[in-house]
Image (spheres, rainbow, N blue to C red):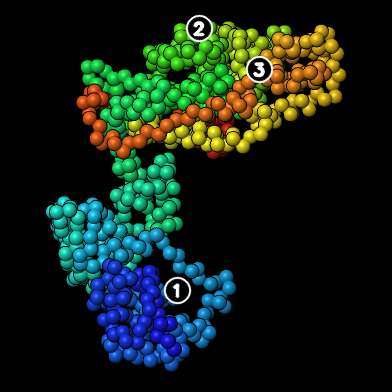
């Protein structure tokens, strides 16, 4: 056998290194090769055993043992050998073949004689024990290994790794000395069992690193066994483990952290520790909520310099420098909105960070029926002053575009006043969903759900009625069913704000404020972050969203956006069997189940669906095809086309690097903005909006305390015989 073909596989703590063997090597040479493969091992700190066919645990402690090993390899005609390295006096680990070597030398599987042994697990069937899982915490066992070990993170890194090492090794320790420059720890059983485990680490004053100066890594106490639960597994350990994950998943929940520790580390973590660990990780990653406000002045300057043409306003109290309001609309959004549907959905959402507040948002809609983030602001409350301030900036942005924009909102008083003040000539639509829930609230004391559903159904017919005649017909039925409550409610609603039959302008078939709700849901997790991280996080999401859609639309081959192209095909198929009669070159009568008149020049149909949706109805397409002169696309709004969509995302948003923020001269950006003064409410912080009574939230069923029956009575009104 040639010497060059001999090699060894050495395993230590589930890690394996391989090296070539030479018959001229002695014991020290092999030890050096092992130490070269495992940088944290020092010569003399470990024992060696090797395996041969039929001899599972051969001692390897001297030059004589090395010579015998080479002789045995030649006799057995094998070219490799498995060597097991273990701490002096410590327990063994797993060999490279995946089998355990115990202190009594009982190894049932060697490197070359697997056929000579019997694995009883093969005959147990469904009773076969599951294979051991390799946990991510296995590497913690090597965190405290040898004298001279370096910890570049200083005392914090040393403490963190010391705790992880103790958790994985299965023992508790106590600090004898614990300060920023020196840490001395010993086994907690030092006094009761006389355990000699001990570590001393000092800080190097030159580089600030921590180094282990003394280490006795052998336990002489009883019961050193890794457990699923450990008192050392606190919130700081959770923080160090999930910090990287939190960057990509800021909304990770404590239950998800508990599950990850169980599945990936084999450790049990309580909900409280998981929650506090997440909060520590957030603070470490994003900084303190209060300090985040001091970065807003820099961020405003950075937005205006990196994204020229953007609209960014920061307001603070001139006397106290405390934050008041922040408005932002990126240049890419301003330019892109010019090619979107002239429609803005306005709403407010709660902020869930330490200082609370509201985020006011105006969201558009592109030609493919997707939401288009336009502008948003952070304010302290949803009141008249803040809504007026928000719409004043929207006016400054939209005025140069020269388009009539339709607004869809809820009925908040401050919002209604602001729209009327700054956009008196713009169509304004109330959200149908909110109106429907208001109607439901009128009858919340009614126990018959079928009655409420009937009222809602009649109200829907009134709201969607396309003509005045159909409106009054359905209104009579609604008032007949709903009585006085619905009459009083409708008297307070302007007809031109919610009814299709009376709406002035175009709302492009939109009846609800769902687009704004989509944006709120899209930013839900970010609204839990400090204000600076939230604002920049939203910018990054918008930037990525615009880039993704810009790339996607390059592959489109249709004239209209894919969604509208599908609508076009389905609508045209509806009237393929209808006959069409000409009245004038532009006016036609379409004979469907009920005949209608279509005016191609004015783009109207007597069914009014063309006017309501600003998209030709089936009757219109039948008339257009009857003419056969101009293509159907001539009668479709430009912002539904692919070219318009591409222009919406042609500009994009530029990155805002923070690499030089540290060197920014604070005097150049004015006074430091302080956080607002807020009072923390009592109780646990709310993260989910409280639903109104009319929104149909889940109710706890009423159970009688006398008869125990679930129903609509209690023990006072109970008449059941006992």
Instruction: Give whichever of discs 2 and 1 has the lower sequence position.
Output: 1
- Image height check: is 361 above or below 291? above
Position of the N terminus by quadrant = bottom left
Image location (x, y in percent) of residue 166 = 28, 62
Instruction: Give whichever of discs 3 and 2 has the lower sequence position.
Output: 2
Mark 2 Cα within 10 Å, few/some/many (few <14, many 20+)?
few
Determine whether the residue tagged by mark 3 lies in a helix, strand or loop: loop
Q: Which residue appears at 37% of the width and 48% of the height?
A: 244
Image-based side of 481 in relation to 152, left or right: right
Real-space Cα distance between discs 2 and 1? 77 Å
- Image height check: is 78 above or below 489? below
Read off the residue under disc 2: 424
Read off the residue under disc 1: 98
Determine whether the residue tagged by mark 1 lies in a helix, strand or loop: loop
Image-based side of 95 in relation to 155, left or right: right
- How many labels, in total? 3
Q: Which residue appears at 44% of the width and 30% of the height?
A: 653
Image location (x, y in percent) of residue 334 = 47, 22
């Amino acid at each position: 056998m040639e010497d060059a073909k001999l090699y060894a596989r050495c395993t230590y703590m589930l890690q394996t290194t391989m090296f070539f063997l030479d018959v001229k090597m002695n014991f020290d040479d092999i030890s050096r090769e092992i130490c070269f493969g495992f940088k944290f091992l020092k010569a003399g700190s470990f024992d060696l055993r090797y395996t041969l066919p039929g001899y599972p645990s051969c001692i390897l402690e001297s030059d004589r043992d090395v010579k015998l090993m080479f002789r045995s390899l030649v006799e057995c005609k094998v070219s490799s050998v498995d060597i097991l390295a273990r701490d002096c006096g410590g327990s063994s680990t797993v060999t490279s073949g995946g089998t355990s070597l115990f202190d009594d030398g009982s190894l049932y599987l060697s490197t070359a004689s697997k056929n000579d042994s019997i694995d009883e697990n093969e005959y147990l069937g469904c009773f076969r024990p599951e294979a051991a899982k390799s946990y991510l915490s296995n590497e913690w066992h090597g965190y405290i290994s040898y004298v001279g070990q370096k910890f570049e993170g200083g005392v914090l890194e040393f403490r963190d790794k010391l705790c992880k090492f103790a958790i994985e090794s299965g023992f508790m320790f106590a600090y004898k000395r614990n300060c920023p420059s020196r840490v001395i720890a010993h086994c907690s059983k030092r006094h009761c069992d006389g355990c000699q485990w001990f570590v001393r680490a000092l800080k190097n004053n030159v580089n600030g690193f921590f180094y282990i100066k003394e280490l006795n890594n052998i336990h002489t106490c009883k019961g050193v066994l890794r457990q699923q639960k450990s008192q050392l597994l606190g919130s700081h350990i959770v923080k160090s483990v999930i910090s990287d994950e939190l960057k990509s998943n800021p909304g990770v929940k404590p239950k998800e952290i508990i599950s990850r520790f169980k599945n990936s580390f084999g450790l049990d973590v309580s909900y409280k520790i998981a929650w506090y660990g997440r909060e520590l990780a957030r603070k470490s990653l994003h900084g303190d909520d209060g300090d985040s406000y001091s970065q807003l002045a820099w961020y405003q300057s950075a937005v205006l310099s990196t994204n020229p043409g953007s609209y960014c306003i920061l307001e603070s109290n001139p006397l106290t420098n405390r934050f008041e309001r922040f408005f932002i609309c990126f240049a890419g959004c301003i330019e892109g909105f010019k090619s979107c549907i002239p429609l803005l959905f306005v709403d407010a959402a709660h902020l869930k960070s330490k200082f609370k507040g509201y985020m006011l948002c105006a969201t558009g809609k592109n030609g493919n029926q997707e939401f288009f983030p336009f502008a948003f602001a952070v304010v302290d409350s949803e009141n008249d002053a803040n809504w007026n301030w928000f719409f004043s900036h929207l006016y400054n942005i939209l005025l140069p575009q020269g388009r009539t924009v339709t607004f869809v909102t809820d009925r908040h008083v401050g919002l209604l006043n602001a729209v009327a003040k700054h956009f008196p000539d713009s169509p304004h639509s109330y959200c149908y969903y909110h109106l429907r829930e208001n109607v439901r609230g009128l009858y919340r004391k009614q126990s018959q759900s079928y009655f409420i559903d009937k009222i809602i159904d009649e109200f829907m017919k009134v709201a969607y009625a396309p003509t005045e005649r159909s409106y009054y017909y359905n209104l009579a039925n609604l008032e007949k069913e709903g009585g006085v409550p619905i009459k009083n409610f409708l008297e307070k609603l302007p007809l031109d704000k919610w009814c299709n039959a009376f709406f002035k302008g175009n709302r492009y078939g939109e009846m609800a404020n769902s687009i704004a709700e989509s944006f709120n849901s899209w930013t839900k997790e970010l609204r839990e972050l400090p204000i600076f991280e939230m604002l920049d996080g939203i910018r990054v999401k918008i930037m990525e969203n615009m880039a993704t859609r810009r790339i996607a639309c390059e592959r489109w081959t249709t004239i209209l956006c894919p969604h509208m192209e599908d609508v076009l095909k389905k609508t045209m198929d509806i009237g393929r069997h209808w006959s069409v009669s000409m009245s004038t070159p532009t006016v036609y009568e379409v004979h469907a189940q009920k005949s209608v008149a279509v005016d191609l020049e004015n783009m109207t149909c007597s069914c009014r669906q063309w006017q309501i949706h600003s998209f030709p109805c089936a009757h219109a397409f039948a008339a257009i095809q009857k003419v056969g002169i101009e293509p159907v696309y001539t009668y479709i709004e430009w912002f539904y086309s692919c070219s318009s969509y591409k222009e919406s995302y042609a500009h994009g948003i530029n990155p805002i690097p923070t690499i030089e923020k540290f060197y920014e001269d604070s005097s150049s950006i004015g006074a430091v903005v302080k956080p607002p003064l807020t009072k923390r409410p009592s109780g646990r912080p709310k993260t989910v909006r409280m639903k109104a009574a009319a929104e149909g939230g889940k109710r706890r069923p009423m159970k009688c305390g006398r008869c125990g029956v679930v129903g609509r009575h209690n023990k006072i009104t109970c008449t059941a015989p006992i």
